[in-house]
Amino acid sequence: MSRVSNPQKDGDYRTGGGPIRRGISFAVLFLLGPWTIRPVFVASLMFMVNQSAEVRVMQALGVASPLGRAAIAENVLYAVLLGCALWLAGRLVGPASPDARWARPRYLLAVALAVTLALVVSQASGLYSKELVGYLLIRTFVAVLVIIGLFGVAQSQISRQGDLTQKALDQVEHQREQLLETDESARRDVAAYLHDTVQATLVVVGLQLRSLANDVPSEQADRVRSLVDELETVRMRDIRSASRKLSPDLRAIRLGGALTELASTYEGTMRVDLTCEVDTPESQTEIAMAVYRIVEQAMLNAAVHGRPETCRVIVTRSDQRAGSRPTARSLTQSDELPIHVAVTNDGLPMTSSHRNGAGSAVVEAWVSRFKGSWSLVSVDGETRMTAILRVPEPERFAS
């Protein structure tokens, strides 16, 4: 019929005015609504109310079997009539849209109309005598309001708890987004500092040392030039590699190239077998960055905690429904094929006291952004991190 109204909006009985005023406000809201009318719910409870009253009356009169079939049939019939009348009155008097709010006069008019209609039909059919119509009219009207009020207050509480839960979830999602933005911003700043400031400083120092080599004896000059060569190697290999690892240019080198460079940084530490069957268009670098960061954290975790000899990295895009696995497939060709990331190493297994750290928080944030899932387990002498990313609509990342 209509949505449940919020007690804190329709009449705030929690704050202001003292306990008496709050109690009156709550009583008015509880009885007079407006609440959502549920014909089936009201009819069922009204049958129980009438039947319990019938039993008490029969017991007071000394009837041997108060649960007579005739009384039960009458109460069932009246409950059905009341439910139908509530539905009809709601259709006639209630809001045109199911999502629209009731006005209090229309809400009370609908209940009064339904109760009157049910009693008129009941009297015409011979269920109740004329002498009981006034009594039953008042009793039923109040009972229906109480029943609807009970249901409305309970549903309002549930709705309020749902709103609080949703706010908490939204806050967690916002914090995850902030984590990613802060992490990527810090990485870009450090990468820019290494690429621009540190490299420029090393170039200047190298030029000064070469100039100095011309003013010293030949033996010392050779040693200075050797140091300059080593400095240039550090600048070209280590500094540039660190800069690109911190913030890879995925538009230029794509996901496969970035993962290859990442794997090369672990040479001498562990052997990395890389398989990347996913291509990334320039318009979807955020997806590629998500895959890159997940693989980066998994490999770092393996190298630090597992000390493995071999680490296998597999990035694929597969249609689980068909059981197929397309090779080198572009992310723009289908939005229904999730990206699968698997990083497996043969190092030490996870301990029972293992706890997720900052790296796991980064993985969780990226996976959540793409509505996916991930897991980290040790099975059969191997530790495996798997992640699934749901690729969003392509226009979201359109350039």
Image: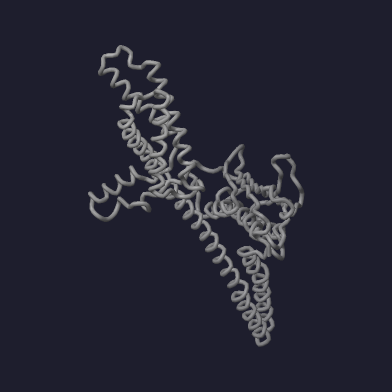
Residue 244 visible (yes or no):
yes
Q: Nearer the viewer, residue 319 or 341?
A: 319
- Rendered residue at 41%/39% (across/down): 113
Whole-percent x, y for residue 376 in the image: 57, 44
Whole-percent x, y for residue 289 in the image: 63, 59
Residue 310 visible (yes or no):
no
Whole-percent x, y for residue 179 in the image: 51, 59
Left or right: 151, with 198 as reference point:
left
Q: Nearer the viewer, residue 186 or 285?
A: 285
Q: Nearer the viewer, residue 19 or 236?
A: 19
Quick one: which residue is furthest to the top in this view? 64
Q: Quadrant of the C terminus?
A: bottom right
Q: Nearer the viewer, residue 98 or 250?
A: 98
Q: Looking at the picture, does residue 219 appear above or below residue 139?
A: below
Left or right: 257, with 60 as reference point:
right
Left or right: 367, with 129 as reference point:
right
Whole-percent x, y for residue 264 in the image: 68, 58
The colour scheme is one colour
Quick one: which residue is furthest to the right in this view? 327
